[in-house]
Image (spheres, helix red, strand yellow):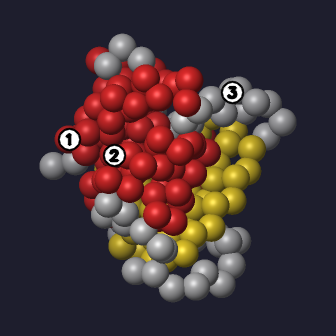
Amino acid sequence: MTQEAIFSGFGGQGVLTMGMILGYAAIMEDKEVTWMPSYGPEMRGGTANCITIVSDELISSPIISTFDSVVALNQPSIDKFEKAVRPGGNIFYDSSNTLKPPTRTDINIYACPVSDEAIKLKNTKVLNMIMLGAFIKVTNVVNIDSIWKALGLILPERYHKLIPLNQKAFEAGMNLIG
């Protein structure tokens, strides 16, 4: 199985971290992984995205222009990447802050109010984990236990106290998918 995904949003929303957690989780399952970040010169507030490919087979190239899944945390990401979803693929988007939702009829569209859910959890920094939970629930590309292990590796030790909150956020995202 191969899952070619792009995670996109504003800098500071955790899009690179989403892709990195997915990549580390896949490595722990002995899968092949590529992770290719791309971001503008602004560290926070500029656009950012990363392509993460997870496969049971060798990956020929990390550079692709169409995706099995697009995860869009803002309107510009929907506008830019909706057309890049392969027919039959998935688009996950933050429906809390979207004026113009995706309209294609040949893909699966998942409206996930992740910003609203993050507010309910009293921490807007976990919206990426909420969206990652929805993504994993649909794609099932890695096991949840691998996500927890990856989170422990990626988060600096001084933030390990936040792992339970991140787990709660991830589960909230899974619950957004029926």
Check disc 3 and give the amino acid type. Answer: Gly
Q: Residue at x 70, y 53 (%)?
A: 37
The residue to which callout 2 is attached is 133
- Horizontal side of 147 relative to 40 (left or right) equals left
Q: Quadrant of residue 107?
A: bottom left
Image coordinates of residue 72 in percent, x first then y, are 50, 45
Check disc 2 and give the amino acid type. Answer: Gly
Vertically, is 29 above or below 39? below
- Residues at circles 1 and 2 in contact by the CB criterion of under 8 Å: yes
The residue to which callout 3 is attached is 45
- Residues at circles 2 and 3 in contact by the CB criterion of under 8 Å: no
Vertically, is 37 above or below 130? below
Q: Quadrant of residue 39?
A: top right
**Foreground residue, 162 or 92?**
162
| Neighbourhood count class around disc 2 (C-alpha, 10 Å): few under 14, some 14–19, many 20 upward | many
Check disc 1 and give the amino acid type. Answer: Asn
Specify which label sits upstream in the sequence, 1 or 3. 3
Specify which label sits upstream in the sequence, 1 or 2. 2
Estimate the spatial distance between the alpha carbons at disc 1 and disc 3, rounded to whole Å.
Answer: 28 Å
Q: Residue at x 43, y 25 (%)?
A: 162
Estimate the spatial distance between the alpha carbons at disc 2 and disc 3, rounded to whole Å.
Answer: 23 Å
Estimate the spatial distance between the alpha carbons at disc 1 and disc 2, rounded to whole Å.
Answer: 8 Å
The residue to which callout 1 is attached is 175
Q: Residue at x 32, y 47 (%)?
A: 134
Image coordinates of residue 138 in percent, x first then y, are 29, 59
Q: Secondary structure at mark 3?
A: loop
Which quadrant is the N terminus positioned in? bottom left
Quick check: can you spot residue 13? Answer: no
Q: Nearer the viewer, mark 1 or mark 3?
A: 1
Q: Secondary structure at mark 2?
A: helix
